[in-house]
Image (tube, helix red, strand yellow):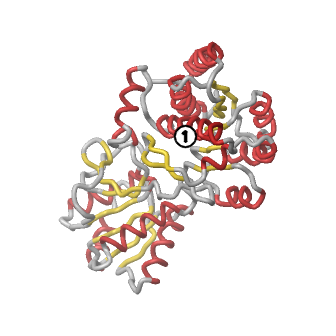
Amino acid sequence: MINLRGIAAFLTLLVAAAQGHAAGVTIGVVAPQGGPLGLLGAQIAAGAGFEIQQSGNTLVAVNETCEDNSGAAVADALVNAKVQVAVGFLCSETLEGALPKLKDANIPAITVSVRSRILMEDALKNGWPLFRMAPADGAEAAKVIEVILKDWAADPIALIEDGTIHGRELSEAVRNALEQNGLKPVFTDTYRPGQEQQIALVRRLKRAGATRVFIGGDRNDVAVIARDARAENIPLSILGGDAMRAANQPLPLADGVRAVTLPEYAMLPEGTAAADLLRAKGIEPEGYVLPSLSAALIAGQAAEAAAAAGKPVQEMLLGTTFQMPVGAITFTGAHELSQNPYRVLEWRRSGFFPPAAPTQ
């Protein structure tokens, strides 16, 4: 497993290996190499670096500080190194300053993290070469709505949220979609988060006749609500959002609770082979590791195809379907993923897995 102390040695090894053959595609890897975001940067470096080395391409590692006005220097480093594609980019602050210069140098940037809707709108308006492997702003709500309308439309539905901006906006998006489809929740409420018990809440849900409840809140609140509903013999089917991807503590989540969230790619059929290769090298395929590996693989394939066709790399990224360890990736004309990466998953003992049956 790569940790902060191992970042420098790991990157030095990869850079040395790349310089040793100096062949293939030159790919920039932009990620924090220390500081508060160093662990996430290590995941990006590990995944992308592994793939670049495996494919015999050339790695250019660029530190990302995520500070305001830091992007221009990142772009200068990429341009001076003559990279053909750059991947990583944990922070929108980096991209805001880097993209104008990357446009001038015809260097596409593939972010595995940044979700800002405004940044992508600016990129499209200005012709900046930004491609997003992270889900777009609003993708989580869209998938929650899809699941509820598909599986719960005939049932009494409750919508509750924790009062945070994200929880409230997510719940409101679902409520608006239900109303547009002629459906009205039997119960809506804002609960107080961080409580040791929610018995009064689950009893109110029972009195309202709710059997399905969407919770816009964090994992521990969902765990408390699920536990108390079971203790009160109140049958509730519970669905949460991406906030459910968190440590399974202090209260373990009950089996059967579902979440619309990003999957653990190493658990998916398409990700197991890459995960095994990474583990054989002492790299745990967690977090951004497999997405960054996939971004580097896409970068290499697109650059090679562009060289063979005599076309810009950006043109080869658009509309091409890349079969990756994180699933099939296709960028639309808006430079977004063609498929919503969020999935409905079910908690079983130690992780979120694809449900064995339709949402109950």
Q: In percent of the image, x 29 and y 78: which residue is there?
A: 156
Q: Position of residue 129 (x, y in %)?
A: 70, 49
Helix, strand or loop status at disc 1: helix
**Residue at image x 77%, y 46%?**
103
Q: Is residue 29 above or below residue 222?
A: above
Image quadrant containing the C terminus: bottom left
Residue at the far front in the pictured view = 309
**What residue is drawn where x is 63% and y is 60%?**
334
Instruction: Decide if residue 251 is on the left or right side of residue 160.
Output: left
Q: Looking at the image, can residue 141 be seen?
A: yes
Total label count?
A: 1
Question: Residue 306 vs residue 190: left or right?
Answer: right
What residue did someone put label 1 on?
Answer: 298
User: Mark 1, residues whose alpha carbon is within 10 Å: few (<14), some, or many (≥20)?
Assistant: many
In this view of the protein, which residue sits in the foreground, 110 or 91? 110
Q: Position of residue 307 (x, y in %)?
A: 65, 37
Q: Eyeballing the image, is 197 above or below 296?
A: below
From the viewer's perspective, tell me whether residue 180 is left or right of residue 358: right
- Residue 5 seen: no
* Front residue of 45 and 272: 272
Amino acid of disc 1: Ile
Between 317 and 87, the one lying in front of the other is 317
Residue 277 place in picture, x, y as percent: 39, 26
Residue 282's quadrant in the figure? top left
Position of the N terminus by quadrant: top left
Residue found farthest to the bottom: 182
Nearest the viewer among 54 and 252 is 54
> Could you say where residue 104 lies in the image, as x and y percent from the top left?
81, 44
